[in-house]
Image (cartoon, grey):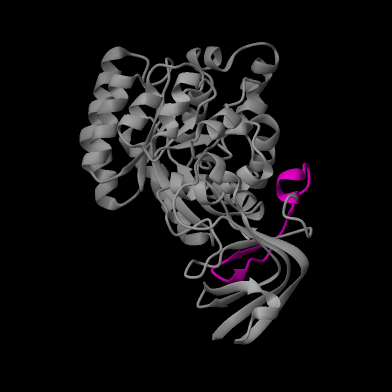
Amino acid sequence: MNADLLITGISQLVTAKGSGAKHGPAMRELHITERAAIAICNGGIIWTGKEHDWSGVAQASVNVGNRAVVPGLIDPHTHAVWAGDRLADFDARTSGETYETILAAGGGIRRTIRATAAATKDELFSLAEIRIHALLRSGATIIEVKSGYGFTPAAEIAMLEVIQALAARTPARLLPTLLIHIPPSDTEDRTRYIAEICTELIPEVARRKLATAVDIFVEREAWHVDEAALVVQSAKQHDLAIKLHTEQFQRIGGLELGVRMRALSVDHLEACGPDQLAMLAASSTIATILPGVSLHLGIPAAPGRQLVDAGAAVAIGTDLNPGSSPLFSTAAALALAVRLNGLTAQEALVAGTVNAACALGLADAGRLEVGLQADFLVLEGSDWRNLAYALGSNPVREVWIRGERLQA
C-alpha cells in the first residue's frame, strides 16, 4: 500500500464507527486505537491502525508527538454573518429584561437585521471571515452558516451570496442554510412575506443552489406552526432539506412539525418536555442542542441527558450569533454540553462529529475511517478527553483538512 503521508505518534485515535446517526447508548461507543497511525492519499484516509502494523510505503511522515487525534468537529448551527452588536441588549438582560421582551420591543434580532441591512456585502464578508476562522481554529472543519438577518427576499439572497463567497475562501466546508427568522409585526405584512418566501425566495435559492436547507424559527414571538408548515412544504417541493429552530422558549408544536415532516434536525429544545423525548427517539430527526444559549441567556439547558437516555440522536452546535450565543469555539460548545446538558465526554464527541454530520444530511463526515476525507484534529494532550475538559484554553493543537495541516 502506498500513501502520500503517514501520520504517526498518535497516542489515541478516537472515532465513532460506521455511518448513520448514533442514538442513545450508541453515543457512548467510541473506537480507540492506542499508538496509532493514519495513512493518507489524495486527501483521503486509506488506512488506520496501530503504528507498528503499518506495512506500506509513505512518501512522507509527520509525527504528532504522542498526542490524541479525533475527527474534525462539525458545527451544525451558526449565524456567522451579521453586522453591528447587541451590547445594549446584553445590558438590558443583565438588568432583568427577558430575551422575548427585548425582541417584542424592537431589539434583539430586529436590531441585528437593521445593522446587517446597513452593511455592504464586503463588510459582511470581512466580519464573517474572522468568525469562521475562530470556529476553524477551535476544531470545526465543517460549518453550517445561516442567513436570517435579512427582512426581504433580496436581503436574504445577499446574505447567502456572502456565505457562498466565504465558502470559496475558507478551507472549512461551509453549508449554507436559508433561515426564515422572524416575521413582520403587521399581520397583513406577515401574510405577504410568507407568500414571498414560498413563491419567490425559496424557488430562487433552490434554482441558484444558494442553500442546502431551509430553517424556520417557530416560537410565539416568531413564526407559528401553520406558517412554518407552508415554508417547510415549499422547501421540500424544491428539494431543499429542512431544519427548525423550536422549543427554545415555549412549546407551540414546532418539534412535532419537524418530526412529522422528517426534518434533518430540530434545534434548541430548551423547553422540550418529557412527552417529546420518545417522539424524537423514534424519529430520524436529530436533536441539536446549543449550550451557549443557556450559558449566555441564563435559561434552562436543553435536556441532553434525558434525550440520550430516551434513545434520541443528539448533536451539538455553537449557535454563534450576536445576541443569544456569542460563542466562537466549537470545542467549547462540547465542553459546555457536558457541564450544562449532562452529556458524557464520549457522547459530546459523537454529538460534535458523526451526529452533527447527520444533522446536516452528511453521511461521509464526522468519522476517521478508510474512504473518508482526512479531516482530523491533533489535540494538545495525549488523552482525548481533554477536548471536553479544557475551559479557557484551546485544546486543539492542529487542524487538518483533506490531509493538509492548516497554518494558524
What x and y, as percent, mark residue 284? 39, 40
What x and y, as percent, mark residue 50? 67, 73
Q: Where's the C terminus, which quadrant?
A: bottom right
- Please check the rendered image and state whether residue 44 is part of the magenta-colored stretch, yes or no: no
Front residue (pair 155, 323) = 323
Left or right: 238, with 295 as reference point: left
Residue at figure coordinates x 28%, y 51% from the top left:
208
Left or right: 72, with 94 as reference point: left
Residue 331 sits above or below residue 342 on the image: below
Front residue (pair 324, 301) = 301
Q: Quadrant of residue 328?
A: top right
Front residue (pair 70, 139) = 70
Residue 162 seen from this side: no
Left or right: 315, with 408 as reference point: left
Q: Residue furthest front?
A: 25
What x and y, as percent, mark residue 389? 76, 44
Give the magenta-colored segment's residue range.
Answer: 386-408
Front residue (pair 3, 126) = 3
- Please check the rendered image and state whether residue 401 is part of the magenta-colored stretch, yes or no: yes
Q: Quadrant of residue 345?
A: top right
Residue at figure coordinates x 29%, y 22% from the top left:
227
What x and y, as percent, mark residue 395? 74, 52
Q: Where's the N terminus, which quadrant?
A: bottom right
Residue 35 seen from this side: yes
Residue 194 sits above or below residue 396 on the image: above
Residue at figure coordinates x 53%, y 19% from the top left:
107
| Count of numbered circles on the image | 0
